[in-house]
Amino acid sequence: MSDTALPHAPRKLRLATVSLAGCFGCHMSLLDIDERLFELVEHVEFDRSPLTDIKHVTHCDIGLVEGGLCNAENVQVLREFRAQCKTLVAVGACAITGGLPALRNPLDVGELLVDVYRERAGLASGSRVPDDPELPLPLNRVHPIHEVVHVDYFLPGCPPGADAFWQFLTDLMAGRTPRLAHGLIRYD
Ligand code: SF4
C-alpha cells in the first residue's frame, strides 16, 4: 500500500468542483492525476462539476473552487457552493488572489466595455455594449473568493500540480488535515 493509499470509507464522499473566473487549467491539472482517477472514483462521487456537466450543486463533503469572482453569477454560484459544501477549497491563484483576471482591476470596467464594443476600430456601425439580461453583470473588480465566503483550505499554484491535488484530496478523504510535502506547494 502506498503512502497515500486510502482505507475504504463506509460511504463515498461527494465532491463538487466549479470554474468561476478561471481558465480551466486547474481542472486540467486535477485530471493529470491520470490513473489515480480510478482510485479517486472508488472513494468519491462527483456532484456538480465540469467533469459531470451537473449544473446544480447539492449537499457535498468537499467543494473545489477554481477562479475568482468577476461577475454577479460567479458570486451567486460561490454562495451556493459555500452553503452546500462542508469543506470549501480555494484552488489556484485565481481563486486565492484573483489571479490573471484581476489584472483588469486598475482599469475602469465601464470604460473598457465602451472601448471594446463601441469605439475600437473595425466595429460595425451601431455597435453597442451587450446588455442582454441573460448576461451576468460584471463586477467593478475581480475578487478572490475569501472576500465573499469563508474558505477552509487554500491550494496554491497556477495551477497546483497533479501530485499536490492527489496529496490534498487523499488527506481530505482520509479525514486528515491536508499537508503538502516540500516541493508540492508552488505559487507559479
Ligand atoms: Fe488557470 Fe492558473 Fe487561474 Fe488555475 S490559477 S484557473 S491554471 S490561470
Image: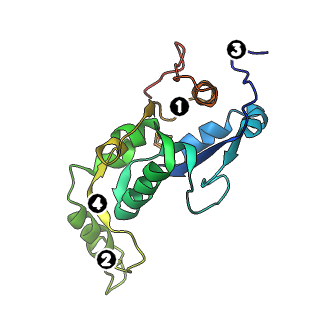
Query: Which image quarter: residue 170?
Result: top right
The nearer-to-camera label among 1 and 3 is 3
The nearer-to-camera label among 2 and 3 is 3
Question: Where the C terminus falls, by quadrant?
Answer: top left
* Category of crowding for the residue at label 1, using alpha-carbon neighbours closer than 10 angstroms: few (below 14), some (14–19), many (at least 20): many
Instruction: Give the spatial CA distance, label 2 vs label 1.
Output: 36 Å
Query: Which image quarter: residue 172?
Result: top right
Mark 4 vs 3: CB contact within 8 A: no
Instruction: Give the spatial CA distance, label 1 vs label 4.
Output: 26 Å
Lower sequence index among marks 4 and 2: 2
Question: Where the N terminus falls, by quadrant?
Answer: top right
Can you tell me whether the CB of the residue at mark 4 lies under 8 Å from the nearest atom of ligand 1? no
Query: Which residue type carries mark 1?
Result: Pro
**Mark 4 lies on residue:** 139
**Mark 3 lies on residue:** 3
Query: Disc 3 on helix, strand or loop?
Result: loop
Query: Which residue type carries mark 3?
Result: Asp
Q: Is residue 57 above or below residue 146?
A: below
Q: Is residue 4 above or below residue 17?
A: above
